[in-house]
Image (cartoon, rainbow, N blue to C red):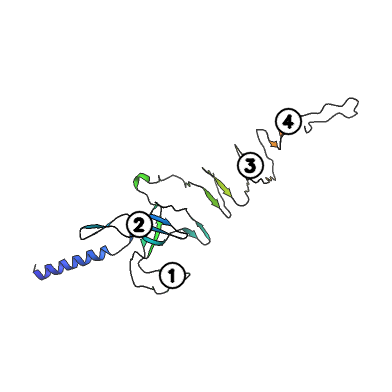
C-alpha cells in the first residue's frame, strides 16, 4: 500500500471516530435539580479527549418524559439523585417546544444529535438498586387519583389511598378493620348504603353499642296494661 493510501485510510478512520464521538444519542445522567416542568441533570460517564478524562457539563431545563394519553397521565415525583437517560433528538426541537406545538416547522437551528435537544427518561438504576421485576403490576408509594377508576379483579394497596370523589361497590365489600375517623375523613362525613351492611362485630353509634341496643329490654312498669315489647334503646 502506498503512503498516500495509508494517509487516506488514516484520515478516514480519524474522521469516522470524530463523527462517532460527536454523534450524541443517549447519555446516562443523574438529576441535580427538579424544576416545576423540567430537570437539570449531570452526565455520569466522562468522555475521553486526547487520552484525558473530561467531565461533561450539567444540562439545564431538560424536559422530563411523562406517560400520557390524551388528557390522562401518570406523573411520578422526581428527586435529586435519580438516574435518567438523556435522549438526544436528531433535530433541534426548540420551535416546537416553545411555540405550543407548532407541527411541521423548520428547526430554528440546524444542529443534529446535540446535547441541547434532549429529553430525560427517569427510572434507571445500577444493579445494586435495580427494582426486581414483578409478576404483576406493582405500585409503591402514595397516590392521589382524580377522575374515574375501574378495577376488574383484586386490588391491593400497601400505603395510603386518598380519593376525591365517591367509592361505589357493586359486589360484596369487606373491611376487616376500619377506623371511623380515617374512613370518613378526619373532618367527618357520611357513609350511605343502599343494601344490607353486615358485621360480625359490634357497631358503635355515638356512645351507644348496637348489640346493647338490640338486647336491652325495659322492665314492665307495675300496673301497666301493655308490657314492653322487644328490645328497646338503652
Marks 3 and 1, how far apart in space?
50 Å
Q: In this view, does 233 lie above or below 108?
A: above
Which residue is at the front of the view, 149 or 110?
A: 110
* Disc assigned to residue 212: 4
Count of numbered badges drawn on the protein: 4
| Residue bearing the label numbered 2 | 42
**Residue drawn at the location 37% of the way across and 45% of the way down:** 129
Marks 1 and 2, how far apart in space?
24 Å
In the figure, residue 58 lies in which quadrant? bottom left
Q: Is residue 173 above or below residue 229?
A: below
| Residue bearing the label numbered 3 | 181
In this image, 203 relative to 139: left or right?
Answer: right
Disc 1 crowd rating (10 Å Cα; few below 14, some 14-19, many 20+) is some
In this image, 27 relative to 232: left or right?
Answer: left
Report x, y in % for residue 77: 47, 53
| Residue bearing the label numbered 1 | 96
In this image, 227 relative to 163: left or right?
Answer: right
Quadrant (top left, top right, bottom left, bottom right) of the N terminus: bottom left
Marks 4 and 2, how far apart in space?
67 Å
Amino acid at each position: 500500500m502506498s503512503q498516500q493510501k495509508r494517509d487516506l485510510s488514516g484520515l478516514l478512520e480519524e474522521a469516522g471516530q470524530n463523527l462517532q464521538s460527536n454523534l450524541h444519542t443517549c447519555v446516562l445522567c443523574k438529576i441535580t435539580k427538579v424544576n416545576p416542568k423540567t430537570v437539570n441533570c449531570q452526565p455520569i460517564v466522562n468522555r475521553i479527549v486526547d487520552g484525558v478524562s473530561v467531565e461533561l457539563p450539567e444540562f439545564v431545563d431538560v424536559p422530563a418524559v411523562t406517560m400520557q394519553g390524551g388528557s390522562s397521565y401518570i406523573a411520578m415525583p422526581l428527586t435529586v439523585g435519580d438516574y435518567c437517560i438523556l435522549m438526544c433528538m436528531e433535530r433541534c426541537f426548540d420551535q416546537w417546544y416553545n411555540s405550543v406545538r407548532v407541527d411541521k416547522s423548520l428547526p430554528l437551528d440546524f444542529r443534529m444529535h446535540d446535547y441541547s435537544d434532549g429529553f430525560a427518561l427517569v427510572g434507571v438504576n445500577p444493579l445494586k438498586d435495580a427494582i426486581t421485576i414483578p409478576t404483576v403490576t406493582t405500585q409503591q408509594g402514595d397516590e392521589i387519583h382524580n377522575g374515574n377508576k375501574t378495577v376488574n379483579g383484586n386490588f391491593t394497596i400497601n400505603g395510603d389511598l386518598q380519593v376525591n370523589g365517591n367509592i361505589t361497590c357493586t359486589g360484596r365489600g369487606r373491611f376487616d378493620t376500619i377506623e371511623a375517623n380515617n374512613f370518613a375523613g378526619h373532618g367527618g362525613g357520611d357513609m350511605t348504603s343502599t343494601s344490607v351492611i353486615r358485621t360480625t362485630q359490634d357497631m358503635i353509634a355515638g356512645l351507644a353499642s348496637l348489640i346493647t341496643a338490640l338486647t336491652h329490654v325495659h322492665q314492665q312498669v307495675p300496673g301497666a296494661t301493655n308490657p314492653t315489647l322487644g328490645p328497646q334503646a338503652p
